Amino acid sequence: MNGSAPNGKSINWRALLFGPLWLAYRKTYLNAGINLIVIAIVSVASYVAERQLGTLPTAAERAVYIGLTSAFGFLANWLYLQHATIAVNDILMTSALTHIEHRLAGAGSVSAAAAIAMLTAPLPLASCCPNFAIGGVARQTGK
């Protein structure tokens, strides 16, 4: 599902579509948290702008979300490679020879529970800021 160009650059469609959920599923929790925080900051800024200006700057907000998700789609494979390289090097440096295969297998799995947790994490923010939506999809509120 990942498209790869001849120059080695690729886009990760799952990451582009699911953002921080994909990162949490792949056990890159720090990157997932950073991605979610960026989405939250943009959402809160949009909410404040709506309250101050009386209107939601939808074109600008959507441009920011599209830019963030596009950049994330292109960077996701690199972020995951960095995460995996660090994890493998750590296991190789700290494990006894007999335990390396077992630790590598455990480190390479995925976490559906973390993805589900990422779905529920923004609920308090969504209740106070109606413009917030996970995955960078803004919604307008009626007045």
Image: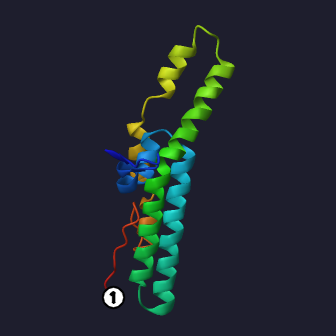
The residue nearer to you, when weighing 125 against 81, is: 81
Q: Measuring 39% from the left and 55% from the top, which residue is drawn there?
A: 16
Query: Whole-percent x and y of residue 117?
Result: 43, 46
Quarter the C terminus occupies: bottom left
Secondary structure at badge 1 equals loop
Most extreme residue toward the right, as rendered? 93
Q: Is residue 35 above or below residue 24?
A: below
Q: Measuring 62% from the left and 9% from the top, which residue is drawn there?
A: 97
Residue 121 shows up from this direction: no
Q: Is residue 110 above or below residue 97?
A: below
The type of residue carrying mark 1 is: Lys
Query: Whole-percent x and y of residue 20?
Result: 45, 52
Q: Is residue 90 above or below residue 118?
A: above
Q: Is residue 93 above or below residue 77?
A: above
* Residue 89 quadrant: top right
Most extreme residue toward the top, as rendered? 98
* Residue 134 quadrant: bottom left
The residue nearer to you, when weighing 59 against 71, is: 71
Q: Measuring 36% from the left and 67% from the top, which residue is drawn there?
A: 137
Q: How many marks?
A: 1
User: 10 Å neighbourhood of mark 1: few (<14), some, or many (≥20)?
Assistant: few
Residue 51 shows up from this direction: yes
Left of 88 or right of it: where is 61?
left
The residue nearer to you, when weighing 63 against 41, is: 63
Quarter the N terminus occupies: top left
**Residue picked out by circle 1:** 143
Query: Whole-percent x and y of residue 99?
Result: 57, 12
Q: How is the image coloured?
A: rainbow
The residue nearer to you, when weighing 40 against 69, is: 69
Most extreme residue toward the bottom, as rendered? 53
